[in-house]
Each structure stands twice: as structure tokens, then as C-alpha cells.
């Protein structure tokens, strides 16, 4: 019967309009394809989220998806080259 088979071997494709926009980020906010981000582990709730660069391009700003604790990473010449961070 259609719909009774669950295939966990591959990722389903997102709906066409989300693929064209580049996907949907936290809380349904659209993100452009190729937009810069950092991977952040929020120790407060043991969760992971992407933190995206702001419109001015001066810092990465985001929040914990559970408790909404803010995380801000300033972009500068003397910064780090790491892409994944843990915050508490």
C-alpha cells in the first residue's frame, strides 16, 4: 500500500520552493544558499545550531534553539579560523 514504506537510506528533497530559496533556517527564517555560518554547540541545553552572519557582515549572531540564549561572534582580522564552537 502506498505510504507504508519508510526509506531511511537517503535524505528526502525539500519542497521545490525551499530548494530555490536555499533552505529554511531556525524558526522558519529563509537562508540564502551559500550564506556563511558557524556551527555552535549550546552547552546550556546540549543542542546544536547554525549561527549566521548579520546583514552588515560584522558578526555572527544566533541563539540556542531551546532556551534562546544569545551567541555573538565578532568578525575581525585577528579572529580564529575555526568553524565550530561550544558556548555555555
Image (cartoon, rainbow, N blue to C red):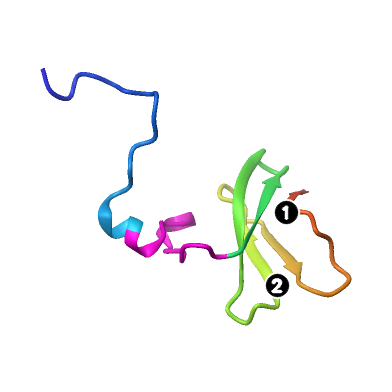
Disc 2 vs disc 1: which is toward the camera?
1
Question: Mark 2 vs mark 1: which is more N-terminal?
Answer: 2
Residue 66: x %, y % from top left: 57, 47
Residue 42: x %, y % from top left: 69, 46
Residue located farthest toward the bottom when viewing the structure as drawn = 56
The region drawn magenta spans: 20-35
Residue 3: x %, y % from top left: 17, 25
Labelled disc at residue 59: 2
Is 1 or 65 nearer to us in this picture? 1
Image position of 44 with respect to 74: above or below: above
Number of marks in the rendered image: 2
**Quarter of the image with the N terminus in it:** top left
For label 2, the SS is strand
SS assignment for the magenta stretch, majority: loop
- Locate residue 24 relative to residue 20 in the image: left or right: right
| Residue assigned mark 1 | 83
Image position of 26 with respect to 1: above or below: below
Labelled disc at residue 9: none
Q: CA distance from mark 2 to mark 1?
A: 13 Å
Q: Residue at x 78, y 54 (%)?
A: 82
For label 1, the SS is loop
Amino acid at each position: 500500500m502506498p505510504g507504508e514504506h519508510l526509506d531511511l537510506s537517503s535524505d528526502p528533497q525539500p519542497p521545490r520552493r525551499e530548494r530555490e530559496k536555499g533552505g529554511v533556517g531556525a524558526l522558519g527564517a529563509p537562508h540564502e544558499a551559500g550564506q556563511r555560518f558557524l556551527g555552535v554547540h549550546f552547552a546550556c541545553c546540549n543542542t546544536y545550531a547554525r549561527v549566521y552572519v548579520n546583514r552588515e557582515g560584522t558578526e555572527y549572531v544566533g541563539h540556542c534553539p531551546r532556551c534562546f540564549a544569545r551567541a555573538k561572534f565578532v568578525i575581525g582580522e585577528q579572529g580564529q579560523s575555526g568553524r565550530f564552537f561550544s558556548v555555555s
